[in-house]
């Protein structure tokens, strides 16, 4: 393989970048093929967060893994993924986003193969940890590339596609996983949920040269202390979210939140001091202080938490009360996926007419869907109308399509192109953390209430919690700046 055909070598950026490495102007065109290539890597990372869920029973039977090991197969991926996103974005700013995307996609493809070939549960856990780290390398480059080389309606359309990919990917993962396991393709059972990534990843790698090469104009420094503090804070928070339900929420686990709070305060002081001295902090306080990013993230957290809780509690009801298998449960989310994808195509036009109020409209649509679902479940239990449930799920997806892509645009609107990787890393980290936290809180609340009250009461009260999240988003949406 020649140097031109292989992946480009990893070079240390210099103060005077080489011509090929200089950030491309914002008017550079992101072709349809290039957008498809970067979104391919992104959708693989999203799908693999959920596709394994429906294969856990088969994995347990084949590799003899206990509940704790299976939990690591699921949560290990999310742990290294969330931990590495900000650093991955920063590396893209420094060394080049196309470069980091290419290496991240190659690593993701290789680790997917390792997952599919794993002979023991221990090997599978390690491979999943590495797979999450690879995803953290490639994902921030997607939004950063869009931010660096598009403007106006082109950017709005690209971020709309990104938002559609984010929303639909989680649903597709469950549907596809159930389908692959039930079909038992080539007789390899659960392994196909990982092996399917290999040909897709290779195809995207062959076209990665079509992606514009961008990076920061000036040589960015690195922030070892900030990186350590950020990593320690994230580990403490993620440990509570991931291990809490299985360990029964012991006191020592809650104490990690205090450690995380101290780490977060120390991180703020270190980053402010470093930026005041002219350094390059991992999380730039000046960038994070922009009204669009600050308010957008404040809305993104409850929105993503509600989304995570909705998906998780839906799966518990569908598979627990109604007895659906993984494939049937995933298929029930098809109205969400279809509505989300269709409406996301029109969000740029709606946003042009309504500005930031498109988020307000989205909260109203989602609120109506939650009210419909609550009424259908309460009045029709134990045999609610499936058609009305699917209608409610569809409207929930339509509302998400109005909110999600607009918040992405709002958060990144004030981020300089030179820091696009850092900005996208912060955005995706917040989204992933909130989604995981929402699933944990929603699932724990549902299980606790179903045991003491009834299934339908628990489901309706969880929907009421989601309505509270939406009220927060609604209030913030009234003060959001115009994302255009």
Image: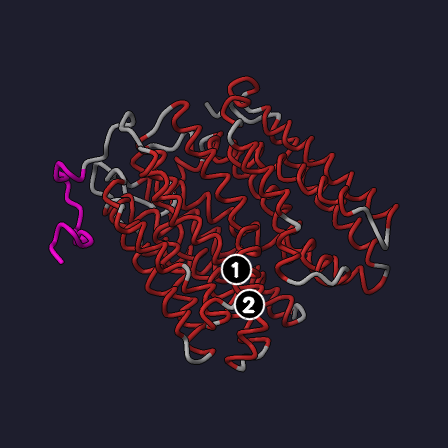
Which residue, given by chain and number where applicable, does mark 1 sit on?
51
Mark 2 vs 1: CB contact within 8 A = yes
Image quarter in which the N terminus is found: bottom left
Residue 25 image position (x, y, % from top left): 25, 28
Q: Is residue 327 left or right of residue 276?
A: right
Tell me the number on the disc at residue 55: 2
Q: Which residues are magenta?
A: 1-21
As drawn, the residue found furthest toward the bottom would be 64
Q: Nearer the viewer, residue 301 or 44?
A: 44
Q: Is residue 156 above or below residue 256?
A: above
Tell me the number on the disc at residue 111: none
Residue 288 image position (x, y, % from top left): 43, 38
Residue 290 image position (x, y, % from top left): 45, 31
Asked where in the image residue 224 lies, by quadrant, the reply is bottom left
Give neighbour class at mark 2: few <14, some 14-19, many 20+ (Cα, 10 Å).
many
How far apart marks 2 and 1 lie (CA) works out to 8 Å
Q: Secondary structure at mark 2?
A: helix
Residue in the image at 58% along x and 67% along y: 243
Residue 187 is inside the magenta segment: no
Mainly helix, strand or loop, the magenta region?
loop
Residue 101 image position (x, y, % from top left): 30, 49
Q: Is residue 307 above or below residue 83?
A: above
Image quarter in which the C terminus is found: top left
Give neighbour class at mark 1: few <14, some 14-19, many 20+ (Cα, 10 Å).
many
């Amino acid at each position: 393989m020649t140097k031109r055909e292989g992946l480009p070598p990893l070079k240390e950026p210099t103060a005077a970048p080489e011509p090929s490495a200089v950030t491309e102007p914002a008017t550079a065109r992101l072709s349809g093929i290039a957008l498809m290539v970067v979104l391919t890597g992104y959708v693989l990372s999203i799908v693999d967060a959920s596709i394994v869920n429906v294969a856990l029973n088969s994995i347990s039977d084949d590799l003899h893994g206990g509940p704790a090991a299976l939990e690591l197969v699921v949560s290990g991926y999310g742990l290294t993924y969330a931990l590495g996103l900000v650093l991955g974005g920063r590396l893209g700013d420094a060394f080049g986003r196309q470069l980091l995307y290419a290496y991240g996609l190659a690593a993701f493809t290789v680790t997917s193969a390792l997952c599919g070939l794993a002979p023991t549960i221990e090997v599978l856990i390690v491979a999943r940890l590495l797979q999450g780290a690879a995803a953290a390398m490639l994902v921030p480059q997607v939004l950063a590339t869009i931010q660096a080389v598009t403007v106006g309606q082109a950017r709005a359309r690209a971020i709309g596609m990104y938002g559609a990919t984010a929303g639909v990917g989680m649903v597709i993962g469950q549907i596809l996983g159930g389908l692959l396991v039930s079909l038992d393709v080539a007789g390899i059972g659960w392994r196909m949920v990982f092996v399917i990534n290999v040909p897709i990843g290779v195809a995207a790698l062959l076209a990665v040269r079509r992606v514009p090469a961008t990076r920061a104009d000036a040589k960015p420094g690195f922030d070892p202390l900030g990186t350590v503090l950020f990593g320690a804070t994230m580990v403490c928070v993620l440990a509570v979210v991931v291990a809490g339900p299985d360990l029964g929420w012991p006191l020592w686990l809650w104490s990690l939140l205090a450690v995380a709070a101290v780490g977060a305060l120390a991180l703020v002081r270190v980053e402010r001091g470093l930026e005041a001295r002219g350094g390059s902090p991992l999380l730039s306080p000046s960038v994070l202080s922009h009204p669009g990013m600050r308010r957008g993230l404040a809305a993104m957290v409850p929105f993503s938490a509600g989304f995570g809780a909705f998906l998780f509690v839906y799966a518990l009801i569908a598979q627990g009360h109604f007895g659906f298998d993984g494939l049937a449960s995933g298929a029930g989310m098809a109205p969400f996926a279809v509505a989300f994808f269709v409406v996301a195509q029109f969000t740029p036009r709606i946003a042009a007419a309504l500005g930031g109020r498109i988020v307000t409209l989205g909260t109203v649509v989602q609120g109506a869907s939650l009210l419909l679902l609550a009424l259908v479940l309460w009045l029709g239990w134990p045999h609610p109308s499936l058609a009305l449930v699917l209608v409610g799920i569809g409207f929930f997806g339509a509302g998400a399509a109005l909110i999600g892509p607009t918040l992405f645009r709002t958060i990144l609107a004030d981020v300089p192109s030179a820091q696009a990787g850092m900005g996208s890393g912060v955005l995706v980290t917040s989204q992933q953390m909130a989604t995981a936290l929402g699933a944990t809180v929603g699932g724990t609340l549902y299980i606790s209430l179903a045991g003491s009250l009834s299934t339908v009461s628990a489901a309706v009260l969880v929907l009421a919690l989601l309505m509270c999240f939406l009220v927060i988003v609604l209030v913030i949406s009234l003060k959001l700046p115009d994302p255009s």
